[in-house]
Amino acid sequence: MSRFWSEAVRGLTPYVPGEQPRLAGLIKLNTNECPYAPSLRVLQAIRDAAGEELRLYPDPEATQLRQVIAARHGLQPGQVFVGNGSDEVLAHAFMALFRHAHPLLLPDVSYSFYPVYAQLFGIATRSVPLDPQLRLRVQDFLDAGPNGGIVFANPNAPTGIALGLDDVERLLRGNRDSVVLVDEAYVDFGAQSAVELIDRYPQLLVVRTLSKAHALAGLRVGYALGQADLIEGLVRVKDSFNSYPLDRLALAGATAAMQDDTWLAHTRGRIVASREQLSAELRDLGFEVLPSSANFVFARHPEHAAAELAAALREQRILVRHFRKPERISAFLRISIGTDVQCEALVQALRGVLQAPSPALGE
Ligand SMILES: *Cc1c(COP(=O)(O)O)cnc(C)c1O
């Protein structure tokens, strides 16, 4: 706290990212990164871009990358916005599209960055509870009263549960006067994308990232898809904030990534297979595992407190994520899908912890 801080800064409660430890040899299953290396074509493109031209600013419009993304989704380049990670894209969308008289609706259990952006930009929110099985109920959003926008992740984070495309469309049909933002950070692992609805619903914005399925969390590239006038609103915010959010290396790497469908299909297949295997093994250990369409599972054990399980795993150099809040998910662990070897190490460690005579029961 400094007396030089503005009142706005004093009032912030920043997002807390998952731990990025500097220790070697950890099994890191806490931030939903990909356990596999990115495509070799991506690495080569970045090397090729790492030359004399770095003295020049990058293309502020990311023309080539937006063309490649548009082509991949059957859209026009004017329907694509790119940013420094989807977190930045989300921030611009909140600023551009959600500052209205009515509150922004969001699920009570969701990506914990959404309320942080709302606070930063002075946007009132109303949280809509997920049902007892932690599923999003479209009707509850439609019944929540006037809103200045709706945001949710599909699949949801941290539950991993997907909402069907028919439900997404039902929400759009019942909510035509404010923007519906669908955060598809994990869509490649099994959910149906809403991209095909863009041409019919001018209020739909779909946000994607290369951090998860493309194994490029370190490159910081995300994008948004929507009708051209929505996208133009994001560009206005971007050009009032930072004209060059993507550097030359990120542009080169992301362009190559969006062209390597073979790598994506292969990697996605491996992760989905490992997810199904890990879910079955966790159930054998007595865990309740929510049905995941993402690259992580959300699981709780009826007899063991999640915080203590996470601490015990940490002692064995395995990191998983535990959220103390909101209360209704504090019994769960969120476990990113690692390689099969990492998943097996996790299962072995849990087996040891669950069988240990000292009760991990803190309640
Ligand atoms: C990981 C994640 C993001 C952020 O992705 P970046 O592109 O790395 O900023 C956004 N939304 C959800 C739901 C996520 O899980």
Image (cartoon, grey):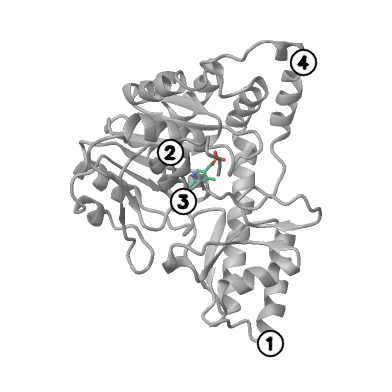
Circle 3/circle 2 CB separation < 8 Å: no
Q: Residue at x 34, y 50 (%)?
A: 106
Left or right of 341? Residue 233 is left
Between 46 and 269, the residue placed more toward the observer is 46
Query: Which amino acid type is marked by label 4?
Result: Gly
Residue ID for mark 1: 358
Q: Please, what secondary structure does the residue beneath circle 4 have?
A: loop
* Distance between mark 1 and mark 4 Cα atoms: 58 Å
Q: Please, what secondary structure does the residue beneath circle 3 have?
A: loop
Query: Which amino acid type is marked by label 3?
Result: Ser
Circle 3/circle 1 CB separation < 8 Å: no
Q: Residue at x 70, y 60 (%)?
A: 340
Left or right of 83? Residue 205 is left
Residue ID for mark 3: 112
Residue projecting furthest to the right: 24
Circle 2/circle 1 CB separation < 8 Å: no
Residue ID for mark 2: 7
Front position among marks 3 and 2? 2
Query: Which amino acid type is marked by label 1?
Result: Ser
- Which mark is first along the chain, 4 or 3? 4
Left or right of 302? Residue 46 is right
Residue 34, horizontal then vertical, whole percent: 65, 47
Residue ID for mark 4: 51
Q: Please, what secondary structure does the residue beneath circle 2 have?
A: helix
